[in-house]
Image (cartoon, grey):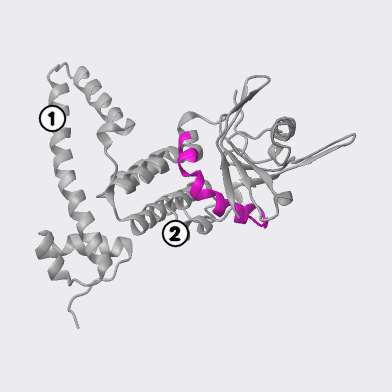
């Protein structure tokens, strides 16, 4: 077990761990607004690593820096997926941090689990001569619009872990994907966040809904390098076995490759349409003639993503 003082992610499965590590720099200011009104003039990364007792490693440390050094303190974030009493563990982290840096430490837990947050909300530990208190943010209690309205894709995808209110999951997933397209517009980056969304959807048992929504998009990440593609290949192979046709394996793969080529052309066409609609300088006829697509194709994209269609230039 290892301790990341500043941002503790070791308790999470590797795939969730990776997403939060990749996105944390963008999420820090945004999540701080949800948790606290602390004044954060400047964040500084302390890159040193230090081993102390029971094989816990300290790294990824964030230090809040002020003009007056006496006001400086450390920030300890933990992304937690299980509802459990964290007080003893947080006390241990606090002690290890203070032993090394001789600074005050403010601690925050971001709870992303699907269980009701009960035990984890016990955020005060009082013993003789000791009092520890930390903040807990349950993402399930945050209204989805808080994340959907962000201009950071790293924040938008967290809507999958938020409170949907009365909206159906299918609608929320569609809103997340549409907002990502509006914010990003570039296929490589869009694929990255689509994949992250798919991974996070497992925490809310929304994998099937999210997969179907991603598959329905003209722009989606390379399925041939992803578990969804591998899952399809395995199903195709199994079907071939049931039919007693060994050659069915290669046939199924070849069909997939052909579909992939067609999909690639469509992806590029949608990317070009989105870019031209964003500029608001081209008429519908201009777009169809330049990209060689139908008016229906352009209008469907514009309607789905909320772009204005220009029929005639003034």
Above-or-below relation of 160 to 146: above
Task: Check the image and name the residue furthest to the front.
Answer: 68
Mark carried by residue 151? 2
Mark carried by residue 88? none
Report x, y in % for residue 272. Answer: 20, 57
Report x, y in % for residue 65. Answer: 64, 50
Label 2 sits on a secondary structure element that is loop
| Residue sitting nearer the eye, 244 or 157 | 157
The residue depicted at 32 percent of the width and 44 percent of the height is 191
- The stretch of residues the image draws in magenta is 18-41
Which corner quadrant of the image does residue 33 belong to?
bottom right
| Residue sitting nearer the eye, 128 or 116 | 128
Dot 1 alpha-carbon crowd within 10 angstroms: few under 14, some 14 to 19, many 20 or more: few
Q: Are marks 2 and 1 in contact (CB under 8 Å)?
A: no
* Magenta stretch, overall SS: helix
Q: CA distance from mark 2 to mark 1?
A: 40 Å
Q: Earlier in the sequence, mark 2 or mark 1?
A: 2
Mark carried by residue 254? 1
Which corner quadrant of the image does residue 223 belong to?
top left
Of badges 2 and 1, nearer the viewer stands 2
The residue depicted at 29 percent of the width and 52 percent of the height is 186
Image quadrant containing the C terminus: bottom left
In the rendered image, residue 31 lying in the magenta stretch gets the answer yes
């Amino acid at each position: 077990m290892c301790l990341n003082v500043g941002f503790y992610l070791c308790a999470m499965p590797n795939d969730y761990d990776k997403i939060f590590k990749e996105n944390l720099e963008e999420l820090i200011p945004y999540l701080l607004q949800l948790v606290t009104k602390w004044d954060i003039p400047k964040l500084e990364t302390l890159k040193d690593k230090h081993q102390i007792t029971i094989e816990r490693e300290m790294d990824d440390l964030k230090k809040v820096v002020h003009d007056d050094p006496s006001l400086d303190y450390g920030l300890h974030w933990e992304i937690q997926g299980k509802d459990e009493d964290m007080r003893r563990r947080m006390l241990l982290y606090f002690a290890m941090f203070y032993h090394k840096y001789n600074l005050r430490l403010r601690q925050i837990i971001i709870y992303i689990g699907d269980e009701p947050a009960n035990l984890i909300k016990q955020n005060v530990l009082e013993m003789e001569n000791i009092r520890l208190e930390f903040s807990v943010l349950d993402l399930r209690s945050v209204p989805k619009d808080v994340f959907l309205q962000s201009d950071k894709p790293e924040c938008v995808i967290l809507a999958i872990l938020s409170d949907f209110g009365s909206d159906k999951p299918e609608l929320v997933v569609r809103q997340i994907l549409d907002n990502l397209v509006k914010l990003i517009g570039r296929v490589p980056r869009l694929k990255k966040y689509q994949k992250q969304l798919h991974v996070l959807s497992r925490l809310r048992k929304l994998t099937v809904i999210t997969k179907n929504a991603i598959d329905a998009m003209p722009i989606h990440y390379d399925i041939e390098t992803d578990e969804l593609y591998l899952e399809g290949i395995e199903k195709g192979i199994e079907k071939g076995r049931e039919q007693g046709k060994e050659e069915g394996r290669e046939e199924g793969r070849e069909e997939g490759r052909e579909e992939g080529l067609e999909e690639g052309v469509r992806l590029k066409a949608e990317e070009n349409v989105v870019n031209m609609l964003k500029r608001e300088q081209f008429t519908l006829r201009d777009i169809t003639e330049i990209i060689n697509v139908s008016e229906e194709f352009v209008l469907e994209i514009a309607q789905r993503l909320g772009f204005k269609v220009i029929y005639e230039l003034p």
